Image (cartoon, rainbow, N blue to C red):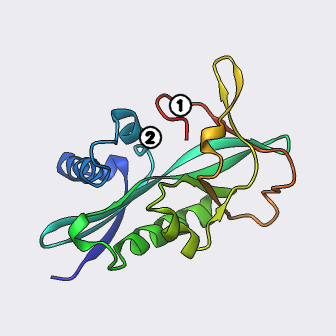
Amino acid sequence: MSAVLRTAHTSDLTPAELAAARGLMDAAFGGDFADEDWEHALGGIHALVHDGTGLLAHGAVVMRRALHRGRWLRVGYVEAVAVRADVRRRGFGGQVMGALERCVDGGYDFGALSASDEGSALYTARGWQLWPGRISALGPRGVVHLPEEEGGTFVRPAVPGALDPAADGLVFDWRDGDVL
């Protein structure tokens, strides 16, 4: 059976599909995928690749906000991208990203994601750009600089001119767990 790509909002996924996706994250990230990380992937559009053996790959894009050049922009934030270990390097990650990039390009000012060292090659090859500027978040006590996110945050401008690396940095909305 050939692999089939499906996109669906979180609300349209069955409990079994959500459990399979969460299980894939746990396996792919070697236990370093917290409940907060999974929560960050919910409430948006999921891209899932299945075949007769089950779930091969998953990713999601959720709505976030980022302050840049004095304006709050809509961000399609990519979360929970993983490919099952036995089928890596066969294009399934690219299929997932293609579906998510269509969402980003059609519905947001720009896309963003925080990449692992292993994942950064996929994103760079697809035209995502490493953000060279400052990364912060608007937290309960004001703006918090996040230097640990600098050098690992990638962006995909969907609207020409929406981002200017020479201008001020990106200030993301706050969330529990890892902010980015």
The answer to whether 59 appears left or right of 65 in the picture is left
Q: Nearer the viewer, residue 13 or 90?
A: 90
Give the residue drawn at x 68%, y 17%. 141
Residue 158 image offset from top left, x and y in percent: 68, 64
Secondary element at image label 1: loop
For residue 37, what is the image quadrant?
Answer: top left
Is residue 108 in view from this perspective?
no
Amino acid beneath label 1: Arg
Q: Quadrant of the N terminus?
A: bottom left
Write down the residue under mark 2. 40
Q: CB atoms at circles 2 and 1 under 8 Å apart?
A: yes
Tell me the amino acid under the disc marked 2.
His
Q: Which residue is mark 1?
A: 175
Image height of 179 relative to 95, above or below = above
* Residue 125 lies in quadrant: bottom right
Residue displayed at 28% across by 48% down: 30
Q: Residue at x 25, y 65 (%)?
A: 85
Q: Is residue 125 above or below residue 157?
A: below
* Residue 90 image point, x, y percent: 32, 79
State the residue in front, 171 or 1.
171
The image position of residue 132, as x and y in percent, is: 74, 55
Determine whether the residue tagged by mark 2 lies in a helix, strand or loop.
Answer: helix
Q: Residue 146 appears in which quarter of the rendering?
A: top right
